[in-house]
Amino acid sequence: MRKMTMNTVSVEEIGYFEGGKLKCTSWGITEADIRKEGGDYTTSNGVQVHLRILPLISRGKSMTELSLGSYNALVVPSRFVDVELRPGISLVLFSNTGLLIDGVNDPDVSFARHHLHNLHRS
């Protein structure tokens, strides 16, 4: 897992759960009692997504957890909006349920949420 983490720039940490408890991560075997929890939403292909979690092992900054089966991966949310934009262009990313994932270039989140809501009403 450590090799996969080191070779995948978008992933900060990988974990393995056994019996609903975190057994090990790319940092090594864990002794802490960290239980697997349900995500904020599940994608159409079964990946559970948990937004804004604080990693208890690495004690790093807020991450997005992607979980499938016994494995999870922690990703810095800004990776999802790490694209080159022209000056004056902002980007905001919501989940399919309307949860804010992240934004770049100081987006007007309420403006985007309003238009997203109107789009779904049409």
Image (cartoon, helix red, strand yellow):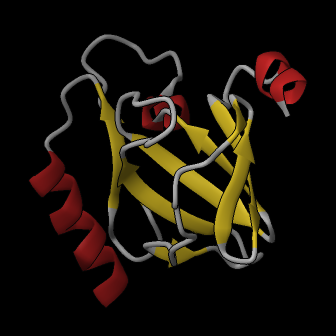
- 43 relative to 23 in the view: left or right: left
Q: Residue at left 53%, top 51%?
A: 32
Occupied quadrant, residue 6 = top right
Q: Residue at left 24%, top 18%?
A: 88
Q: Number of labelled discs? A: 0
Q: Position of residue 57 (x, y in %)?
A: 51, 37
- Farthest front residue in view: 31
Q: Position of residue 62 (x, y in %)?
A: 35, 38
Compared with 32, 27 (above or below) is above
Could one spot residue 122 in this view of the protein? no
Compared with 21, 16 (above or below) is above
Which one is nearer the viewer's eye here, 84 or 80?
80
Could one spot residue 78 in this view of the protein? yes
Give the quarter of the figure containing the N terminus: top right
- Farthest bottom residue in view: 121
Compared with 26, 24 (above or below) is below
Which one is nearer the viewer's eye here, 110 or 43?
43
Q: Residue at left 51%, top 24%?
A: 82
Q: Position of residue 7 (x, y in %)?
A: 85, 18
Give the quarter of the figure containing the C terminus: bottom left
Q: Residue at left 50%, top 72%?
A: 39
Compared with 100, 122 (above or below) is below
Which one is nearer the viewer's eye here, 26 or 122?
26
- 31 relative to 117 in the view: left or right: right
Q: Position of residue 100 (x, y in %)?
A: 31, 56
